[in-house]
Image (spheres, coloured by chain):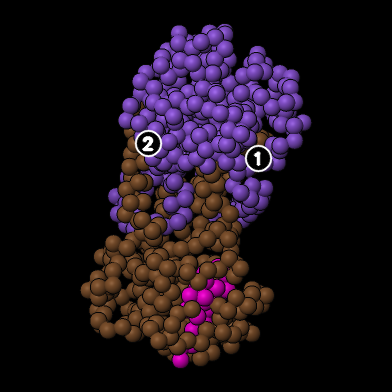
Chain colours: A brown, B purple
Amino acid sequence: MRNITIIGMGLIGTSLGLALRNADPATSPLGALQITGYDHDPRVARAARERLAIDQVAPGLAAAVDGAQLVVLATPVRAMQTLLRELAGLLAPHTIVTDTASTKADVCTWARDLLPATVDFVGGHPMAGREQAGPAAADGTLFHDAIYCLTPDPATREQALNLVEALVLTSGARPYYIDPAEHDAYVAGISHLPFLLSAALVSITSQSPAWQELSSLAASGFRDVSRLASGDPAMHRDICLTNRAALTRWVDEAIGALADMRTALEQADEAHFDALFTQTKAARDAWLQRAPHLRPGEEHYTDRPEVERRPLLGFPLPTRRKDKP
Amino acid sequence: MRNITIIGMGLIGTSLGLALRNADPATSPLGALQITGYDHDPRVARAARERLAIDQVAPGLAAAVDGAQLVVLATPVRAMQTLLRELAGLLAPHTIVTDTASTKADVCTWARDLLPATVDFVGGHPMAGREQAGPAAADGTLFHDAIYCLTPDPATREQALNLVEALVLTSGARPYYIDPAEHDAYVAGISHLPFLLSAALVSITSQSPAWQELSSLAASGFRDVSRLASGDPAMHRDICLTNRAALTRWVDEAIGALADMRTALEQADEAHFDALFTQTKAARDAWLQRAPHLRPGEEHYTDRPEVERRPLLGFPLPTRRKDKP
């Protein structure tokens, strides 16, 4: 029996709990599990228990991690700094800790600085989500075939990496090894920038004096581009504040692209729009083609052990055994 | 038997043909129909006929409109100027003409300037679409419950308005009367700006040196915000070029919103992001709440005749009879 504790029973923590509890102990790389859940809001933890995402609710942080072999932090990013400081005095030697935050560099630094050397930390980020928050929106299949970024550092012990990789596989996701800073730069472009564009659209249209008329005419195009703006404000605030440098570069790129469009509008530059929209359609169609199930990245990860064990972006990993944990 | 001609058998023209041919002649306000299709590319017209969206393919423009009581123009916006000039010499007196273009001011001006006084023109814009183009992507239910903007002017004859409204109702959509310039200003914000934001996202990410890695990590958030960028380049080029003033104002607003975000990133302005993301989530959630079937506008149009006959945005309409055409 393996004891796993999930701290933070929001959308991601509860979805992970559901995925783990739905796994067959006979075939899962994690085997039989006992899952404990904790949330600073006891009502949220109870809601997760009512959804059967956890076996038990812990009454406090100390009780939550007592006896846990693996602790998963699933809070908003910036809450993790305080949490890691509190956990430092509570975790038994050889406890393995991972997280699910959308940015990785700060969290990995905090973990290295705050956790005792006897505890192993492996940063994680499942590339899956919904705009709704909380345990009610959770879904045990949320991670199926999703890319799950893991950001170990060269000092990470093999045992820790094996266990966290087993967690990822049990959730139905595909491990993708990447350096924390690289991760943050990339997700700034394909995840955090789309959110900011979505929020910008909703901000300017909904604060327009004509919003009543605009909102009546808005249809499926508005619905899709604005979808991310319905996401959890605290989560996205934390993402912005922990990924400022990378996000600033992408925001500058977006402002530049819009300024080019503005010039083309002023000059009625047919050729500019032709070239731009032809390029973007081709690029987007090609992306979709490579990702037919909207779970991109399958070409980077297969079940073949030699691929499974390789770092994907040139990030040096410790030598791995071929056997499963 | 009513003869209707559709010129331009792309996504919209073919979807409209399918909707009309699927309507029950016994209950449809249009009664029994004979639908002729024309496209400057004969292969496209044949594909629409193969999908049973039209009863017959016309070999040329003159044959297409010969005997037609109602002519629907469903080409990209800017093709309509030439088309209207050609049609001017071909249309019999009392022919009624409507269009489906995404911008209305230019088209209505061209129609007023180019068509003979004996021909009535009612501008139209169904607020429905897909990112795929062409007859293969057409869908007879595309317009179901969609808002369908109509932009008559005070001189439009009642008979013309009745017939075009009957076309809209038969397609399954809901007529929404609006002034052409108002229409263009509003759709610039909730339809054309979302497209430009989507294209900007795809443009800057897909031309990044890290696109291979970015595209592997891109998931459902990227998919949705980028969806419109897969749209037809010619259609969107024409939209930009015929809605320059309104679109420029919205692009400026978007650049301003992104510049504010950039400042907040630089200053790590927690309060700015908290307020912004809380506002956008509330506005977007409220919009979705009012539009549970993602066909917003139902509250503005019902089947009650007194509402059905009223202009919706203060635009003066000619007095209408209460009976259906």
Identity of the residue drawn at 45% across and 8% down? B89
Chain identifier of the residue bearing label 2 in the image: B
Residue A148 in view here = no
Q: Amino acid at mark 1?
A: Gly
Q: Amino acid at mark 2?
A: Glu
Quadrant in the rendering for residue A309: bottom left
Q: Could you say which is closer to the camera, residue A77 or residue A167? A: A167
Label 2 crowd bin: few (<14), some (14–19), many (20+), radius 10 Å: few
Label 1 crowd bin: few (<14), some (14–19), many (20+), radius 10 Å: many
A234 with respect to B221 (left or right): right
Which stretch is magenta?
A1-21
Of the two numbered discs 2 and 1 on the same chain, state the one appearing first in sequence: 2
Q: Secondary structure at mark 2?
A: helix
User: Would you name the residue on which mark 1 appears?
Assistant: B297
The residue most toward the right is B306
Q: Is residue A128 above or below residue B129?
A: below
Q: Position of residue A52 (x, y in %)?
A: 58, 79
Q: Secondary structure at mark 1?
A: loop
Q: Which disc is residue B50 wearing? A: 2
Q: Is residue B186 above or below residue A150?
A: above
Q: Is residue B235 above or below residue A27?
A: above
A18 drawn magenta: yes
Quadrant in the rendering for residue B184: top right
Tags 2 and 1 both on a single chain: yes
**In front: label 2 or label 1:** 2
Residue A292 in view here = yes
